[in-house]
Image (tube, rainbow, N blue to C red):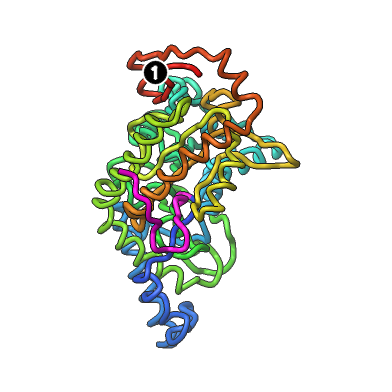
Amino acid sequence: MVGEERTERSFIYLDNNATTKVAPEVVEAMLPFLTELWGNPSSVYRFGREVGKHIEAAREKVAALINATPEEVIFTSCGTESNNSAIESALRTNPDKRHVITTAVEHSANINFCKALRKQGYEVTFLPVEADGSIDLHLLEETIRPDTAIVSVMTANNETGVIFPIAEVAALCRSLGVPCHTDAVQAPGKIPIDVRATGVDFLSLSAHKLHAPKGIGALFIKRNTPYAPYVIGGHQEKGRRGGTENVANMVAFGKAAELALQNQPEENRRVRALRDQIEHHLLTTIPYSSRNGAREPRLPTTTNLSFEGVEAETLLFQLDQLGICVSSGSACTSGSVKPSHVLTAMDVPLERARSSIRLSLGIDNTQADVDYLLQHLPRLVAELRSANPQWEEHLRHKPIRLDTTTKHEDRHSVALPTHRN
């Protein structure tokens, strides 16, 4: 039963794919490096060397998160830098290869970097996706060319939560002699990550997605993979990434990686159950609602839902007034809403794309959070539709028959009324 009481917190945060709250254990771990152990780890004296030991301990923990060796992990400033570094390195170490393949649903860190590469004369293929957000491996195989420098496919989509078959992608790339990179920023703590099992050459991480501070990321570089530094400077990170080390954040990342491994079972059990409760309640009680993206495989924390007849930006504002933080894949520019590039690539109709919101739960979310959301969201959707003068007219021309084929059900779960007013 949907509860009537609001959670004790001043707001309900359901946007964990955007960023996460820094865990108390992480704050505690990094504080000494802001107060007592503030030396430069590149210094030759003992004070600096002692600080450097903590960086290596953090590197070991991040490596353990993805089943890598510490020598295969370099720290960066964020996931964006890690993504850019991997692709740029592949191009610089293979100067005769000027073709890059990525997907049409990647994070903007990849999409915009690849668009910039196009302006520099490189060829980029943005691989299309199916209606459920998945990729066609046969199409990928056909797209790889002798001059392809790298294939970059995300582990899990940040908007829909759809998980990609990275092991199969990497195996295909390996068979054709092409390096494979994956943006795994959304995955840690939610699903297992094993670079040995997947066989990728590069993998990107970002600490602020797993309860550590912003401003620190990591890049896995498979042993013996050619690598050209993206940030050139001093000898830090064994010459693979210049710049004075952000020690406190590196230590924080290490602690967060340790916690992510511990919390992963709960993310997959308790948090998944909360996500499924939200999804089932909304799709079965709100007419003309639908899920965007495949039901499985999907991150256990993420759901992307559309409520036809409602502008997502208006709904987000109304939820914000109630202290509920969720997001939309749309961006409001000059008074017009631009649909999410992810939903556009999935051929989601414009009307539905503009009515879509993403809810992404985390380890801190509770049953009280879910109850409060479900108490108010259906009411807000109904009110916004009532205030939309075009909605009633729209209903007159809308079919009420539901396609119940398995293929349709796997892609979209749609709630329709049993009768029309």
Tell me residue 141's x, y (percent): 44, 23
The residue at which mark 1 appears reads as 408
- Seen in the image, is 104 located left or right of residue 418? right
Q: Residue at x 28, y 42 (%)?
A: 197
Relative to 188, residue 21 above or below: below
Residue, far front: 421
Relative to 308, residue 202 above or below: below
Q: Residues within 10 Å of mark 1 (few under 14, many from 20)?
A: some
Q: Quadrant of the N terminus?
A: top left
Q: Amino acid at mark 1?
A: His
- Seen in the image, is 59 located left or right of residue 87? left
Is any atom of residue 294 visible in this view?
A: yes
Tell me residue 421's x, y (percent): 50, 19
Q: Quadrant of residue 69?
A: bottom left
Nearer the observer, 215 or 411: 411
Q: Residue at x 41, y 25 (%)?
A: 415
- Specify start and end residues of the magenta stretch as a single range: 1-17
Tell me residue 225's x, y (percent): 42, 47
- Seen in the image, is 267 located left or right of residue 48? left
Q: Residue at x 53, y 61 (%)?
A: 77
Relative to 145, residue 31 above or below: below
What secondary structure is found at the residue carrying circle 1?
helix
